[in-house]
Image (cartoon, rainbow, N blue to C red):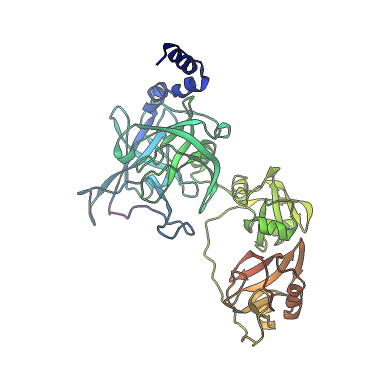
Amino acid sequence: MNPSRWLVVLACVVATPAFAQVRELPDFTRLVEEQGAAVVNIATTQQARRPANVPQVPGIEDEEVLEFFRRFIPRPGPGQGGPGRPESRSLGSGFIISADGYILTNAHVVDSADEITVRLTDKREYKAKVIGADKRTDLAVIRIEATSLPVVRFGDANKLKVGEWVVAIGSPFGFDNSVTAGIVSAKGRSLPQENFVPFIQTDVAINPGNSGGPLFNMRGEVVGINSQIYSRTGGFMGLSFAIPIDVALDVQKQLRDKGRVARGRIGVVIQEVTRDIATSFGLDRARGALVNSVEKGSPADKAGVEASDVIVKFDGKPVESSSDLPRLVGATRPGAKVDMEVLRKGTSRSLPITVAELQEERIAARDTPKERKPVEVAANRLGLVVNELTAEQKSNLKLNHGLVVAEVRQDARAELRRGDILLTVVHKGKHTELKSVDQFNQLLAGLDKSAVITLHVKRGEATAFVTVTGLSDKG
């Protein structure tokens, strides 16, 4: 090869800035040296063997395998206890938040533990007691009797940027003080049945035993607590979720001060505003939380909130998704008076509301309304046969209007069931209460085949908005 050509090639390599950037990878050594000592291993002893804590997540599945979120709890190995015998398991990790022994971890790590052992990096071991735990956020505060302990520094999770490097330290599979690194994949993630936490998603390698361990930014500050993974196998697959540290610190303060966490509630059942719902409601775009129903006597009821309102702001903060509302309301102290902005039939309204306190869940009794004998009539353009409510049904259901679904034909256009009550139909922002079969069928007959409508449906004690795109030519 011509020597001059070699010179050209070498010059191109040296002069390319991108080549130099690829070689500049982050160095985590100083971070680990300074912060690693504040991360602890947590083991518990229980009187009887319990099944691995693997919560099933409804609605997350595909054709071949059920997808689910797993807490990072390793299964016990051979010989680690049996029925009726004490059992010790390294359940997870934690980190020291005060020099006098307070430690933050996950609630599921210490749940139902009879004895908790905390092991430091210098091999010292202490018995710990639970100061308080909050299952709604999966956070717990425990304490050991010790002084002059190393502590972590706290960062601001709100300043995290997607793509930023982060580091996890914990005890995966019992291997103390293991370090893994990755980047922030997304922020503000909503997970099924986790209404009060805007999770930080990362691709940091997290495995059983990492639960409760800290997530650090590159300045060595804790920005999150590793809590869950998304997996088909039970092991790491590139999707990890951490609780933002600001959420955790608020919870731990309440646990230390009062032993419990007080959260706000306003008494509404909500659902997501999809693009189709936004179209049928005449909204400019899909945003906010759609109110399905309002609990009688609740703060929302007293404030004048109505079913079909779309909540777009709470206490001055935007509600872009329905998942935003529980977090905002839950973070509001009970008794606080705030303004809530709603969209009602295309008009914006500001409603002052006094937030109440969220109590433990109560299981409500479900009454099945008596159904009227179906009348043999042709199905309408939705593939439904509907009947008017009897006086008895209206009295039992406390309704003054509505149609009951008597039959759902095979070619039905809506995901409805026999016994559902259709309350309202929404089309191009117009809300029409359903009072008679003729009225409903005439309304459907006047719509284009490609029309998008939304039905307000009552099923048992629950209500929901069901969107239908496209109508049958028949009916």
Q: Is residue 423 above or below residue 152?
A: below
Q: Is residue 386 left or right of residue 84?
A: right
Comparing 218 with 47, the one in front is 218
Could you tell me which residue is drawn at 24 percent across and 57 percent down?
83
Q: Residue 299 falls in which quadrant of the image? A: bottom right
Residue furthest to the front: 2
Could you tell me which residue is drawn at 68 percent across and 70 percent down?
471
Q: Residue 422: where, in percent of width, then height? A: 67, 72
Residue 253 in view of the camera: no
Is the magenta region chiefly helix, strand or loop?
loop
Q: Residue 348: where, in percent of width, then height? A: 78, 52
Q: Is residue 374 above or below residue 320?
A: below
Q: Is residue 286 left or right of residue 105?
A: right
Q: Residue 415: where, in percent of width, then height? A: 59, 69
Comparing 46 with 242, the one in front is 242
Comparing 147 with 199, the one in front is 199
Could you tell me which residue is drawn at 64 percent across and 74 percent down?
421
Which quadrant of the rendered structure holds the C terminus? Answer: bottom right
Q: Residue 338: within the magenta?
A: no
Q: Residue 368 falls in which quadrant of the image? A: bottom right
Could you tell me which residue is drawn at 30 percent across and 27 percent down?
122
**Which region shows up in magenta?**
47-51
Q: Residue 378 falls in which quadrant of the image? A: bottom right
Q: Residue 404: where, in percent of width, then height? A: 65, 77
Residue furthest to the left: 79
Residue 200 in view of the camera: yes
Q: Is residue 16 left or right of residue 92?
A: right
